[in-house]
Image: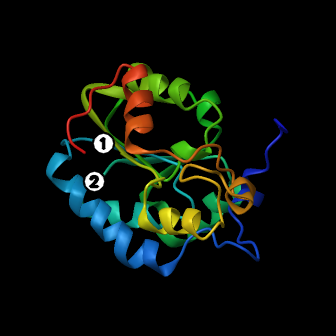
C-alpha cells in the first residue's frame, strides 16, 4: 500500500462515491450532537479531522475553546471561510501533532476508519491529549448497517466489513463492527462509558 497519502485528494467526491451526503449533514450530525451533549465536560474541545467544518460549526454554541486538527490544508481553508476566527486549526497528521494542552472533550467522528494504525492514535489520544476527566466521542461507519448487509446479499460486496474501492479512494482502511471498534478502544486503554 502506498504510504504517501494525499489527504486533500481523499476528501474529494468521486463518480462512485460522495465524501458527504445531505443525510450526514441533516440527519447524522444532529443525532450525533444530541447523543454527545449529555456527556460533554465543561472546558475545551479538540476535534480530530474537521473536514470542511460542518460538524465543527455545531459545536460553537457549546464551547468557547475549540481546536481542530486536519491533515488537508484545502479542508482547513474551506472550514476557516465557514467558521471565521472562532476555531483554532492545526494542519498536521495526528501522528505528528504536538498539542499545547490536554482536552476535556475530544471528537473523532468518521475518522478512525481512515487511520493506518488506529490503536496507536487512540493511545495517543488517551495518554497525551485527553485531560484526567476528559471524554472521547467516537463515531465510525458500522459494518453491520442494513445497507451493507443488503449489499452483501446483492453481491455488491463480499462481506459486511469489506472496504470498497470507493472507500479506499476516500482513505478508508477498515470498516468497523461494534465489537472490533470496542476491541481497539480497549487496547488503547480507554473505557467505554456509553455506546
Q: Which residue does the numbered mark 2 point to in the structure image?
A: 63
Q: For mark 1, give the secondary structure.
A: loop
Q: Which residue does the numbered mark 1 point to in the structure image?
A: 44
Image mark for residue 152? none
Give coordinates of residue 108: x percent, y percent.
44, 46
Q: Does the image show residue 101? A: no
User: In the image, what residue occupies the spot 79% across and 50% down?
Assistant: 6
Give coordinates of residue 150: x percent, y percent.
51, 69
Q: Quadrant of the N terminus?
A: top right
Q: Left or right: 98 with respect to 164?
A: left
Residue 63 to residue 58: above or below: above
**Residues packed near mark 2 inside 10 Å, few (<14), some (14 to 19) or many (20 plus):** some
Q: Left or right: 102 with respect to 91?
A: left
Q: Are marks 2 and 1 in contact (CB under 8 Å)?
A: yes
User: In the image, what residue occupies the spot 38% across and 43% down?
Assistant: 178
Identify the mark nearer the N-term, 2 or 1: 1
Q: Does the image show residue 72? A: yes
Question: Which of 106 and 141 lies nearest the eye of the viewer?
Answer: 141
Q: For mark 2, give the secondary structure.
A: loop
Amino acid at each position: 500500500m502506498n504510504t504517501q497519502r494525499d489527504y486533500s485528494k481523499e476528501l474529494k467526491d468521486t463518480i462512485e462515491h460522495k465524501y458527504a451526503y445531505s443525510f450526514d449533514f441533516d440527519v447524522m450530525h444532529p443525532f450525533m450532537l444530541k447523543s454527545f451533549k449529555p456527556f460533554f465536560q465543561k472546558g475545551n474541545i479538540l476535534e480530530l479531522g474537521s473536514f470542511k467544518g460542518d460538524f465543527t460549526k455545531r459545536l460553537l454554541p457549546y464551547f468557547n475553546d475549540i481546536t481542530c486538527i486536519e491533515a488537508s490544508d484545502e479542508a482547513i481553508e474551506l472550514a476557516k471561510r465557514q467558521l471565521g476566527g472562532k476555531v483554532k486549526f492545526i494542519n498536521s497528521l495526528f501522528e505528528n501533532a504536538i498539542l499545547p494542552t490536554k482536552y476535556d472533550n475530544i471528537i473523532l467522528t468518521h475518522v478512525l476508519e481512515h487511520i493506518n494504525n488506529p490503536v496507536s492514535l487512540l493511545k495517543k489520544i488517551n495518554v497525551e491529549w485527553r485531560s484526567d476527566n476528559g471524554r472521547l466521542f467516537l463515531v465510525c461507519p458500522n459494518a453491520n448497517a442494513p445497507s451493507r448487509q443488503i449489499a452483501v446479499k446483492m453481491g455488491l460486496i463480499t462481506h459486511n466489513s469489506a472496504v470498497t474501492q470507493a472507500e479506499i479512494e476516500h482513505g478508508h482502511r477498515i470498516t468497523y463492527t461494534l465489537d472490533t471498534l470496542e476491541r481497539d478502544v480497549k487496547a488503547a486503554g480507554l473505557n467505554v462509558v456509553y455506546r
